[in-house]
Amino acid sequence: MAEQVAAMCEQLIKAVNVIMDAETSQMFRLEALKFCEEFKETNSLCVPCGIQLADKAQPAVVRHFGLQILEHVIKFRWNNMQQQEKVHLKECAMQLLSNGTHPILEEESHIKDVLSRIIVEMIKREWPQHWPDMLKEMEALTSQGEAQTELVMLILLRLAEDVITFQTLPTQRRRDIQHTLTQNMESIFSFMMAILHINVEDYRKLKETPGHELQARAHCRVAVATLNTLAGYIDWVSLVYITTGNCHLLEMLCLLLSEPELQLEAAECLLIAISRKGKLEDRKPFMLLFDDVAIHYILSAAQGVEVVERRYIFLKRLCQVLCALGNQLCSLVGSDVEVDIPANLSKYMEAILAFTTHSSQFLKSSTVPTWGTLFRHETLSKDAVIVDMAIKYLRTSMTNLVKTGFPSRDDNPSCEYSRVDFDSDEDFNSFFTSFRAQQGEVVRSASRIVPLEAFQIAAEWLQYQIASPIDVGDTASKTAEGLCTALSPSVIQWEAVTFFVECVVTQIFKSLEEKLPIEQSMELLQAVLNYDTKDPLILSCVLANISALFPFVTHRPHFLPQVIYKLFKAITYEVGQDNKAPWTKSVKNVRRHACFSIIKICRDYPRLILPCFDMFYNQVKKLYLSNITLTHMEKCSLIEALVLISNQFNDFAKQQAFLDELMGSVVAEWTSDKMRHVLWDPATFLSFVGADEVVSEQSTDADTTAHNRVRLSFCLFAMLGVVKRARWPADPEDAKAGGFVVGYTAAGAPIYRNSCTAQFLALLPNLLALIRTQNSLFMPENMARLSETFSKAHEVMDAEKNVVLGLPHHLLDNYDSPLYRTQLERMQGFFTALYDNCFQVLGNAGPSLQQDFYTIERLAEEITGSAFVSLDHVPDHRLHLDNALHHQNWLLLYVNGQISLTGVRLFLKQLVLSCPQEYYNSLLCPLLGPLFAYMQQRLNAKWQVINQRTSINGEDEEEVVCQESQVTQEMLEEQLVRLLTREVMDLLTVSCISRKVPESAANKEEIEGMLPSASPAQSTEELTELGKCLMKDENIYMSLLTLSFTSLSWKDTANCQRTATMVCWTLLQQVAGRNLLPEAVTWFYTSVLRGLQVHGQHEGCNSALTQLAMHVYENLRPRYMELRVVMTQIPNISVDALDQYDHRLIDPNAQKAGDKKRKDQFKKLIAGTVGKALCQQFRKEVHIRNLPSLFKKTKPDKDMLNSEAFSLSGLFSPEDSHDFI
């Protein structure tokens, strides 16, 4: 035997060395690896070989492999081992703990880790029932030296992680071990505290003694391990153990913050402790940390931290500790536990402020949520200390809102910290965008507390910025000399002050009604209006400040002409005098920002603008007639503004006459015979827009067709602007007096008419024709008509590809770039915008025209004959029913100093939401029924193609050399199918499902802390009125059900969970009482099980699908025996358990189980259908047997208290159990 072991060990050592040798060929390495794995799986000499290889005389890699063998034996062979073999292995493992390791500073960390795993694996299988003295043995080991003490700490930590954190055990074993840990927690905590105290004291003594440095480091290593173990327990033990002895543990942790070698681990323990939730009464002792001494230790530890990784991480933890302390303060003050505001609150606030003013942007951002919580707190926000701090925070924000600290630069102290926190400038820019938005919320909260002071700070800062000369910095603009870039000092200052002003002014109008600083605000607005700059980036900020301050103009209307003049001047803004030079994005942003500002003013303050209507209208006419270049979007924005003002006429005839004048040329051109010929014929249309011409980038021949595209776009944008903005008066009396009411419904509600109805009805035929023509453009014969230049005109634009694929959009250097750089990109943008705008016009027609739109003769047939024509040829990226993508030529909104793209929801969803109930049968049912049926077939075919791609076996896949572009295209196509799927299901949900959510629990925080996993409040789903209407038609409801249940197995987890939770059963239960065919019922149920096969490895989907399967089975099984046949085909199902479940389900006299127990039983029945993640499919299962339960429940027939057999020892010493040792 000994010779066999020695010979095998020699072979294993050679194999391990071959595996670890970098020079080994792949073939030999694989052979050696196969030999080692087969040995672990099949050889009977595993234990003696493992023990021999684990000897500390062996090299570390060999020892590690030997210990891995022992771990493998325990994990996979333990259940089949004899008792004496278990005892022998346990004794050998304990011997390795005692003297099988090198001294603590010499031993490799991976050896310690695998040795601790071995012990924990045995504990998980035998403790406490068969190894009752485990804790005592661990305690005894600590007396043997520092190495053993560290190992004991590693064992206790891993045990807590496996049992509590990761829960890698069967339920009963986990409950047994957790219960025993909890019972012994007082002694475990005392033991760890004692170990920590002894080693810290010895470390402090020895580190100052010459010649004892190694011993000091050994004690330090033990103290670190103990702190790490404490961190693993503090997170879940009862708060009593953390706060006992007048918070002795927290006091010790605060003291350790001054020890450089221990402070990081101490801070992490402290953070976990202070972040605990639970009963407010139990958290009350945390207020002791507001004591002067504790705050002093925290602040002292924060002093003089250099940019060294470990020290910087410690500073982050310390900052988080202070923030967690603030959250506890906000939870306790003002609650039922009657906690007073700390006397030294100002000292704590100064500590938070110190972190808020730190050079590190990450540390600043860490404090922001705490400031917000304090400023929003009902009691604390009124305290004098917090009021004073609100002013200080606002002044600090003047620095923090400035975007500085790019890791590639050295122009600010924060740059050094940013190089530690961020990988690139883009990474930092993304972070700062989010950080600034969070600061905005806090600035608004602070402005609510001190509104006048906040406005004073904003005014001073803006006045200072106006007076400051422009600093271009060291980055030159590509467009013109002397212009700023996005990183110029002046630009980042202007962006910061603009954001601050917007936040403050917004809050002032909510907080102050009578004491508004009118005069000061008018002085400020006058200074902004007088400020003149040619720099587009700064001018955008100036326009944003004008918009922010405009509400004050309502108190001084004589300022209005100046504001309008400034905005109109910005609409025609250009850099330099060369009109032929291409506009940069920054120039376009200024013009669009001005347009949006005008629309916003006219939308929010139309009565204020009404007296200036003639001046406004004349200014627009003047612009139209001038030689100044205006884009069609800018022209249409001005039309929108005029329509918004005209809504205040309160006179139907007057507004209609004005709209006729405004849109006369558009209506004439759109309804002309020439345009009708263009819009109704695809070949003529392509020729009209120039898509069939070969054009070079320098060619001027395309001017005519480019002008044609502009004319088409302008007509559509103008149409959209009028339909979207024209409305009747909000006041019913004004509407009636103005001639907008044409009748009343049976319920007495007024029926309104819109002034733009006549124009829309005249434009509608050609609009529908254009939609039909655009769908036809994707047919092969029309695709063939595209010239070589524009052969890819219908493909997804690069910007959209990046959005779909989730690729980052670089924002820092795009201000000097043209919006469209090539002829192809211009054509792509034209087709995209034209397609979307057509549906936007239709989508807005319903809410705007209401009765006049829904009563159009044969409307459903007209829409079907245009929007739903040739859908088989329309690509997925065009077929968005509710487009979530953004297009670069839509209206640009100026937000937070940056341009962002946004679009309105398209046709069908708006139609569903706005359509009156009386038109469901005549309009929506004929549209939605065929649409859902078609989309089910189309999407199912698409997902089958995707599944076929992913199911190619590895051998075939290796033979196919995929180009990167091909892979990207496949990813793009799959993601587009996923987006389209979600949009279709969203439309179905909006059409059919109404969701009701009950009120949430009163004290969510306290409940969350008390329960291991609090379940969210359950919502109830009901059919909408439209849903009820759709479900009356058999063809439609079968289409809805087929689409919903089929989608469960499409590879989109988000859609699966949402559909399973909200849609499937809500629809099915409406028809469950009807005579469904057995094949249909079987298919529905099989579809749910198929969804479990595809998505079962995801917890959310698993829960939703299990609940759905249970609903279907329990409600339909009594009538359909076929469901039982399906159940019997599930792999590894227990037929006896199924019989019991069916008996309780069908037999009215059978005892019914509770909901939770019934769900657990059903979950076990269908467990064989649940699919596994790829990473789990080939993983060897670990089986841990249950031991005699510590929680055995008996139903006594006699008085158990008087029984001799009743004793506590009986619970822990069952007759059939035997001790582990």
Image (cartoon, rainbow, N blue to C red):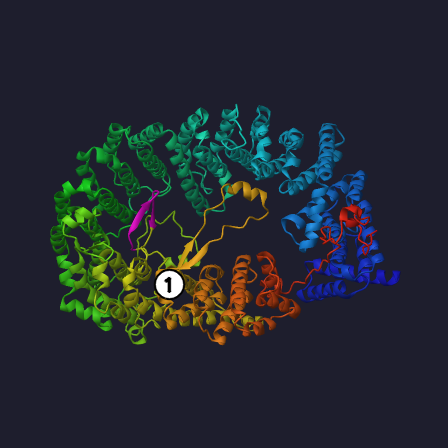
Q: Is residue 890 magenta?
A: yes
Residue 537 in picture, x, y percent from top left: 31, 42
Between 1053 and 277, the one lying in front of the other is 277
Residue 27 in picture, x, y percent from top left: 68, 67
Q: Is residue 962 shown to the viewer in this render?
A: yes
Q: Which range of residues does the magenta coloring cover?
A: 889-900
Q: Is residue 420 magenta?
A: no
Between 1187 and 385, the one lying in front of the other is 1187
Instruction: Label 1, secondary structure: give it.
Output: helix
Q: At 50% from the left edge and 75% from the top edge, which residue is drawn?
A: 1078
* Residue 810 against residue 1069 in the figure, above or below: above
Residue 1118 in picture, x, y percent from top left: 54, 70
* Residue 295 against residue 979 in the figure, above or below: above
Q: How busy is the neighbourhood of tag 1: few (under 14 within 10 Å), some, or many (20 plus)? A: many
Residue 538 in the figure: left or right of residue 126: left
Between 702 and 269, the one lying in front of the other is 269
- Screen quadrant of the N terminus: bottom right
Q: Is residue 787 shown to the viewer in this render?
A: no
Between 806 and 1125, the one lying in front of the other is 1125
Report the label total: 1
Residue 808 in picture, x, y percent from top left: 43, 53
Residue 652 in the figure: left or right of residue 328: left
**Residue topped by disc 1:** 1027
Looking at numbered disc 1 in the image, what kind of residue is underneath it?
Answer: Gly
- Location of residue 973 (image quadrant): bottom left
Q: At 47% from the left edge and 42% from the top edge, which residue is drawn?
A: 407
- Location of residue 217 (image quadrant): top right
